[in-house]
Image (cartoon, helix red, strand yellow):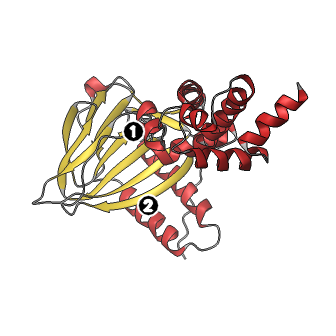
Amino acid sequence: MGNTRHRIEGSRPNSFDQSRLLYVSTSKYEGDWQSILHSHPFSELFYVVNGSGSFVAEGSEFPVGRNDMVIINPHVQHTEKSLHTTPLEYIVLGIDGLSFSFENIASAQDGISMHTASGTVYKYNMTNSNVYAYLNIMLEEISRREENYEAVCQNLLEVLLICMLRNDHLTIVQSSNTVLNRECTQIKNYLDANYSENITLDTLAAITHMNKYYMAHAFTKYIGVSPINYLLQKRIQEGKSLLESTSYSIAQISTLLGFSSQSYFSQTFKKATGRTPIQHRNEYRRKK
């Protein structure tokens, strides 16, 4: 009987305890997709399964094709373009808690790097790796959603990252929430100063260059309420002050606060305070 034992020596080479897999998405360009520049406060891995086209990042553009992996660091404006004759088919991972650093780029023969104002984008070909196999297992786990599939996907992410680190030019940097907290503070300050304007999630996303859904989630986690609820709270707070310190009509106050109508202002005010604007004003005057 033949028996071969391979001894595993050394300690665990890398730890990605701070990283978290946010999503896995698959896409195939079918001609009706409008390519739009966007950014995220987290990193993305963009793996081309089939087809060819180009990748755009903050004014620069480079070709992509089968087995190419594009690494996009947080806050980098980017998008992709597909050739109609050979449509792009790709898998994208969103990863929070880390960013990538690229060393010895000048000597790299298999990669393309672009340093942007916000961060870095890097592309290299992974034909001779098992990355696609791991991505397929991850997609299978997500589609089946069996018990603890999230843990399986998170561990597969770690395997992917270790495989990628075998590229001599790539290192991983654990990232903190400092930048994200700064963006949330920027949103709060904007709402405080412009509460009377017509503000939507799209408005705030454009200001911070963040995906609006992730921005709303991050703001809610950091501030404690959603951006729209914070805006309403700010308007109600200012409404109380105007009701108490001025003789403006309810219609005038609702306009000054940015409400679309007097009835909407009154409805929102009563829901927040338990009193109508008129009741609040009269009660305040009685106490004086």
Q: Is residue 223 left or right of residue 141?
A: right
* Residue 13 x %, y %: 57, 40
Indicate which disc residue 39 carries. 1
Q: How far apart are marks 2 and 1 (CA)?
A: 26 Å
Q: Quadrant of the N terminus?
A: bottom right
Q: Which of 180 and 19 is in front in this view?
A: 180
**Residue 177 sits in which quadrant?**
top right
Q: Which of 141 and 237 is in front in this view?
A: 237
Q: In this view, does 2 lie above or below 95?
A: below
Q: In this view, does 183 lie above or below 125?
A: above
Closer to the N terminus: mark 2 or mark 1?
Answer: 1
Amino acid type at image mark 1: Ser
Amino acid type at image mark 2: Tyr
Q: In which quarter of the image is the C terminus?
A: top right
Can the viewer see residue 12? no
Q: In this view, does 199 lie above or below 266?
A: above
Indicate which disc residue 134 carries. 2
Q: Residue placed at 59% from the left, 51% from the top?
A: 8
* Residue 93 x %, y %: 43, 52
Q: In this view, does 34 lie to the left or right of 21?
A: left
- Element class at badge 2: helix
